[in-house]
Structure formats: C-alpha cells, structure tokens
Image: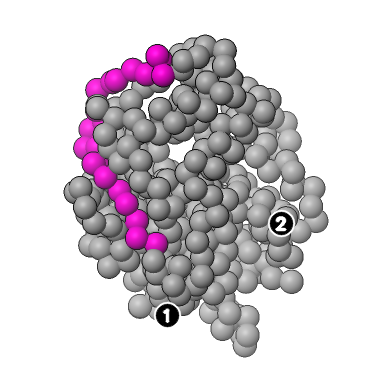
Amino acid sequence: MKTILITGGAGFIGSAVVRQMINETDYKVVNVDKLTYAGNLQSLVSVSNNPRYKFEQVDICDAAEVSRVFREHQPDAIMHLAAESHVDRSITGPADFIQTNIVGTYTLLEAARAHWNSLEGERKANFRFHHISTDEVYGSLGDAGFFTEDTAYEPNSPYSASKASSDHLVRAWHHTYGMPVVTTNCSNNYGPYHFPEKLIPLVILNAVNGKPLPIYGKGDNIRDWLYVDDHARALRTVLETGKLGETYNIGGWNEKTNLEVVQAICVLLDELHPQGAPHANLITYVADRAGHDKRYAIDATKIADDLGWKPQETFETGLRKTVAWYLENTDWVKGVTSGEYQNWIKKQYA
C-alpha cells in the first residue's frame, strides 16, 4: 500500500484531494498542514478516523519537522498544495507568500530529494513529487487565446510571482538533480468547503444574509472555472500517469465574467433560497483590485489527449451543487464565519 504525503491537505483543494484519496483509493494519506486561517480540519471530519489517514501539523518552512515527517512516514509520492493563495492578501501583505510559497517549496524539495536518494529499486523509480500551481503565473490574456503549457510566465501579483518562483524551483530540481517531478497549473476552483473570502462562497453567503455582493470594477474580468472534485481527479491522474518533467494545465472550459458568475449565483438562490429574492438587487460595484488581470483561460487539451482526463461537471451543474451545499451545510459555514473552527481545531489537537 503506497503512502501519499499531501501538503496543505486542510485547505480547500487539498481537503478535496484527501477526501477523494481516502474514499476512492487504498492509499495511505499523510496530511501535512500548518493550519493557517485557511486550514480547516472540519472539512476532513468524514475521513479523520480512517486508519489510512494521518494528520501532521507542520509548517513546510520548518526543515527539521519536514525531515521528521519524511523519516517517520516514508512516502512514495508528494502532492504539494500548501500555499498562501488569496491575491488580495498578497497585495496588502506579501511576506507570508514569499515565505510559504517560495521558501516552503524549497524546504520541501530538499527534504524530498534526500528521501528520494535514500530509496532503492522500484520505490525510487516510482517516486513522484507533484507540484500543484496556478494559471495566474502566466499573467493576463487579451480577448482571444488560451494559456498552454508553453505560455511564457508573466506574473502580475505578489501571489502569482511567488507561485511562479516555486514552479521554477521544481523545474530546476528536476533538471539539476534529476528529481522525478510533475507540475500542474489550474484555473479558478470552486465547490464545497471553499473559504468564504473567495468570490463564489462570499457571494453565496452575503446574498443569503442580505449583504452587498461586491464586484470589482465593471465585473468584466474573465476566469475559467473548475469544479474542485474535477480538479482532484485530475491531480490523481497526473500523479499516477503523468510523464516526469512535464507540466499539465487543468481547466474547466468554463470562461465567465465575474458579473456572469454573480448573476448565475443570484438566479440559483432565487430558486433555492427565495427569501430576499431577487438577490441580484444586492450587486454592488467596488473599486477595482490593484493590477487586476483581465482574463485567464486554460487550454486543457494536453491532459485530455495524453492522460484522458476531462471535467465531469459543467459550470451550471457544478455551481448548482456548490450553492446547494452551502445552503445545506450551515454548521460548517457558521463555524468558519464565526472563527469557531479554529477553537475546535485547538481542542482536537491540544
């Protein structure tokens, strides 16, 4: 039975990967997470008692603790999702992004390299370091075209610059040291358990509570949206069958303006939560984000052609599932919005 070490497994995408790995495979999963504000172990309650699941509260910048985790758990593969990820926070406070996304990735790479070099035979041959990144490293698109795996990097925010740096480190460790790596760059994720600072959950929860629905600028910035469980399946596919040294772009083929996203949420809420309808009356335009990239759009042809992955959800089906989940899971929502989830974590791991 293989052991997969997942960094950032208490985060939004990471927890989806952990749940899927436990529920749909026979892997042992070691979840390594610092538990910043965005790490929520309540998102993993459904798998936390599974004998194949283990949690380690560790900062990936702590070299001694990271090395201990490798020694104790002897992983067969790494899925590196741990990152500071909110663009607005990177603009007002970039230091944490530099530390976690760059220094943390370096620390993890060095620990993984030492571990890999200690392996022999099939375990060494089959070892993988899977680095999970973002389409934001490519910068901003015009009205036409798509990001491909050959698009030049042109990051425009502290967040995307820190992720671009981590991508380059992973590539360098492959070419310099022969580290067996694969890299993926994904479009905007959405779905259950998403921290409420991000657009889709923020709009859902604000609308339910009769609060303004803030939209940057004119709402004409375009993103490609990917349902988080589709992304988790793609990551598993790349880990298991991706070609070493390759990059795979993962997207949902769902380009929407921010205004279209908010309007679609309002329509669903008018149907599923009619109190306060029409919810579109709550839409409010606010000053645009500094350096706001105009358009992201991923060409996911390579992962489809080479590895056979395609998203199962359309934007319409995925958004309906997401809105319904937030309406049904009020305890999780209350725990996050009140901050009580952090007290719960402290009690569990005191």
Residue 172, quarter of picture:
bottom left
Q: Is residue 215 above or below residue 62?
A: above
User: What kind of element bears circle 1?
Assistant: loop
- Left of 307 or right of it: where is 273? right
Mark 2 or mark 1, which has the lower sequence index? 2
Q: Which residue is mark 2?
A: 22
The residue nearer to you, when weighing 180 against 316, is 316
- Left of 279 or right of it: where is 259? left
Q: Amino acid at mark 2?
A: Ile
Residue 77, quarter of picture:
bottom right
Tell me where the magenta segment starts and ends, as one range.
Answer: 280-300
- Is disc 2 surrounded by few (<14), some (14 to 19) or many (20+) residues within 10 Å? some
State the residue at coordinates (56%, 31%).
Answer: 323
The residue nearer to you, when weighing 109 against 282, is 282
The magenta stretch spans residue 295: yes
State the residue at coordinates (51%, 70%).
Answer: 308
- Left of 53 or right of it: where is 168? left
Q: Is residue 190 above or below residue 139?
A: above
Quadrant holding the N terminus? bottom right
- Res 178 label: 1
- Scheme of colours in the image: one colour
The magenta stretch spans residue 99: no
Residue 322 position, x and y percent, is 56, 36
State the residue at coordinates (60%, 54%).
Answer: 17
